[in-house]
Image (cartoon, grey):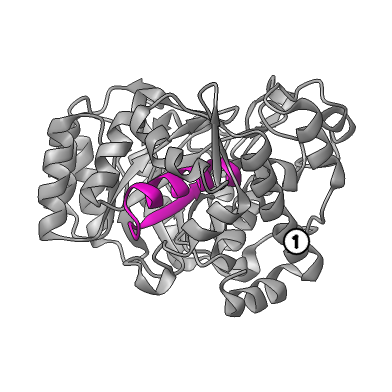
Amino acid sequence: MKNQEQVKISTEKLGEPTVEMLRQTHEDALWILENLGVGCKQPEMQAAFRPLEAEGLAFIHEDRIYVTTDLVKKCLETVPGLKDFFVPRNSFFIGGTAPYVYDDASGEGGILPTEEHVVRIAKIAEKSSVVAGMGRGVKLKDEVVQMNIMNQYCSKPLYFAVTSDEALKRAREIYETRKNIMIVFCLTRPPLEVNENFSDHFVKVVQAGLPVFISAMPMAGISAPFCYNGVLAMTHAEVLFGICTAQLMNPGITCIHAGFPTIADPRIEYNPNYGLISHNLLNLLMTHLNLMLDLPTFQSAGTTHEEHPTERAFADARMGQAMCLKYGFHMIRHPFAFLRYLIDFSIDKLEKSVELALKVKPEDAPQVQMPVYDERGMESIRNIGLGMYMDDPLTTANFGKVFAS
């Protein structure tokens, strides 16, 4: 682990057995990249790895890229670390991208977002001391219009998507005037495949030298093992692939590890459940692994499974925020405004959850039992590989025992 000071902090916060689990999770992710590889058809991404075949550092076969441990270690050496990053520790963001706005007056969701909504969100981000920055919050059809609004009304760090040449041109212009922006990509999709809808623009953004926010969302019980270290390893592997690709194409480019490990809840037909205590803990464990590797890191916490801004929804926000403060983090998205499945964005919930964050204390966090390494996680990955994990014996064995809270 590169950041030994953080190793000490993580050990104090999580305990030695859990830190050892995270160390082994990193090794498991390296095994995944070397033995399962990542499906990738994008020609320039393949070209970045191809020269390394002669050195035995990477292999390309049938549009899968296999990345060796030595190459990952080499790429991690060139990623700018936490001291060189523009967002401080313990930063809550208004982040995520809901397709709809929740109408707080009528109590109904599904409202299409407007420019006025984005202006209002950006103004809240700018004036609130507890908000460190913002992502889009909601999605407008026109990316350039959205980034212009964010740039105009919020001087704090921003992240937004780039999926067109016009958007890239505007992002480069904004970056020239303010360096505190990140371009978000969910570069991979489970299981271990590059999302070719975004790969061309990922290449262009990396070549342009803009900071890249690399997200990945394997889901425990569907596309990853149903245990902490299993889903963390799959998530970590996918993001490490993106980091390696970026470093090979533009060494020294800023990369943000935005791995977003998620839990499929069998009690709700294997849909994701973002209101679980264990969802918050899982993402904070991802954070600590990345901090020990000295990587800027951006996870998810403080969300809910409530469809409306109920008392439970606000209790979930408070719980997640308190856990973040108790265990420490770098950047967190989704802690304020989102409702079930991150589909609806409630501005009323945003404002009230911001107020909560001003008052919440680490002591408000629930007691949790820290997980230790479960060897069955890697057994599942070796057996199932790129398959589905719903019928994995580990999944059924852990029902009601892991991720239940």
Q: Amino acid at mark 1?
A: Gln
Q: Is residue 76 magenta?
A: no
Residue 323 appears in the figure: no
Q: Residue at x 12, y 42 (%)?
A: 170
The answer to whether residue 60 is left or right of residue 366 is left
Quadrant location, the C terminus: top right
Say which of 88 and 325 sits in front.
88
Does dot 1 land on a helix, a strand or a loop?
Answer: loop
Say which of 318 and 51 sits in front.
51
- Residue 215, given in percent of the width and then of the height, sits at 46, 42
Say which of 260 and 52 sits in front.
52
Q: What span is in magenta?
A: 236-258
- Residue 138, given in percent of the width and then of the height, sits at 31, 34
The answer to whether residue 177 is left or right of residue 206 is left
Residue 222 appears in the figure: yes
- Residue 71, given in percent of the width and then of the height, sits at 54, 52
Q: Residue at x 75, y 61 (%)?
A: 367
Asked where in the image residue 313 lies, by quadrant, the reply is: top right
Q: Is residue 72 above or below residue 329?
A: above
Q: Is residue 254 magenta?
A: yes
- Residue 257, given in percent of the width and then of the height, sits at 47, 52
Please rate how many residues cluster around mark 1, counting C-alpha atoms within 10 Å: few if below 14, some from 14 to 19, many from 20. Answer: few
Say which of 89 and 163 sits in front.
163
The residue lying furthest to the front in this view is: 54
Counting labels gives 1
Q: Residue at x 57, y 28 (%)?
A: 190
Asked where in the image residue 354 lies, by quadrant, the reply is: bottom left
Q: Is residue 384 above or below residue 244?
A: above
Quadrant location, the N terminus: bottom right
Q: Residue at x 20, y 61 (%)?
A: 179
The residue singled out by tag 1 in the image is 367
Q: Main secondary structure of the magenta part?
A: helix
